[in-house]
Amino acid sequence: MSGEPAPEIEPVNFDDEEDAKIGYKPPPQKSIEEIIKADKEDESLRKYKETLLGIAKEGAIVVGYI
């Protein structure tokens, strides 16, 4: 390390009003089961989802929005 302080990082401001101005519409919410069942025929995508979702597929995790 050079002894210099780390540069300050500005927090990202997620603003729903700004999203509305640019026309962003979030996709509809899906259950973990729906996410897992989508694209079942794609083996690599299935493995990727299993890695990301882990035990969530067993219903042990609840995903929520702030």
Image (cartoon, grey):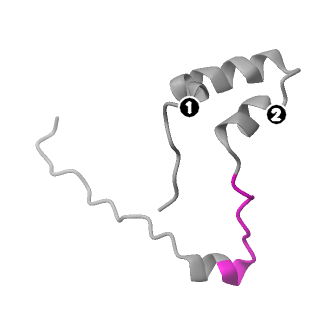
- x and y, in percent, of residue 64 in the image: 51, 53
- How far, Cα to Cα, is label 1 from label 2? 17 Å
Residue at coordinates 88% horizontally, 20% vertically from top-left? 41
Residue at coordinates 35% horizontally, 65% vertically from top-left? 10
Which region is colored magenta?
Answer: 20-29
Q: Which mark is residue 59?
A: 1
Decide whether residue 50 is among the magenta residues: no
18 versus 3 height, above or below: below
What amino acid type is highlighted by mark number 2? Ala
Using residue 55 as the reference point, say whether residue 20 is left or right of it.
Answer: right
Q: Quadrant of the N terminus?
A: top left
Which sits earlier in the primary sequence, circle 1 or circle 2? 2
What amino acid type is highlighted by mark number 1? Gly
Residue corresponding to mark 2:
38
Instruction: Say which of marks 1 and 2 sits in front.
Output: 1
Using residue 29 as the reference point, say whether residue 54 is left or right of it.
Answer: left
